[in-house]
Image: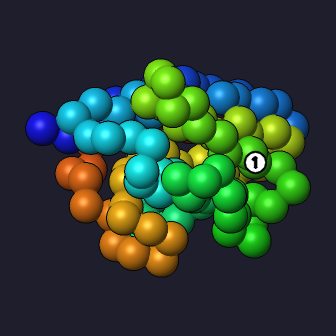
Amino acid sequence: QLQLVESGGGLVQPGGSLRLSCAASGIIFNIYTMAWYRQAPGKQRELVADITSSGSPDYADSVKGRFTISRDNVMSTVYLQMNTLKPEDTAVYYCNVAAGRGIMPFGSWGQGTQVTVSS
């Protein structure tokens, strides 16, 4: 059974950094695209970044140059390094898994990890 467990969120000042982790189990991790999403209060969930099975990353325009997605296929974990954080990055961050880029994720949405950017 697929399980996705996000961690690493917290409260950070504008300009600060956080590193999120998502540990996956129950799947053959290295054949799937992994993605990070976020949902801010009152807004729809949006795709932040994804990384294909071959390690090719892609980012939403709003985070390009500030966020870096990476994966460790041995540890079945995907990371999101977030730098130069802005208040508008405040959201609950979720990870999920898809058969490929542009394909709907098939995992259940977990509890996510809260990121709050505030002075």
From the top left corner, tell me how far across and down residue 53 is, in percent.
Answer: 53, 53
Picture mark count = 1
In-image side of 60 versus 116 (left or right): right
Q: Nearer the viewer, residue 8 or 108?
A: 108
Image colouring: rainbow
Q: Residue at x 42, y 51 (%)?
A: 31
From the top left corner, tell me how far across and down residue 44 is, in percent.
Answer: 42, 71
From the top left corner, tell me how far across and down residue 6 is, in percent.
Answer: 41, 32
* Outermost residue to the bottom: 102
Quadrant of the frame with the C terminus: top right
Amino acid type of the residue that numbered disc 1 sits on in the rendered structure: Phe
Q: Residue at x 65, y 40 (%)?
A: 70
Q: Residue at x 48, y 77 (%)?
A: 102
Q: Quadrant of residue 45?
A: bottom left
**103 to 59, vertically: above or below:** below
Q: Quadrant of residue 14?
A: top right
Q: Residue at x 60, y 47 (%)?
A: 90
**36 to 26, vertically: above or below:** below
The residue to which callout 1 is attached is 67
Element on which disc 1 rests: strand
Residue 76 visible: yes
Mark 1 nearby-residue class (10 Å; few <14, some 14–19, many ≥20):
many
Q: Nearer the viewer, residue 67 or 30?
A: 30
* Outermost residue to the left: 1
Quadrant of the frame with the N terminus: top left
Q: Nearer the viewer, residue 7 or 42?
A: 7
From the top left corner, tell me how far across and down residue 59 is, in percent.
Answer: 69, 64
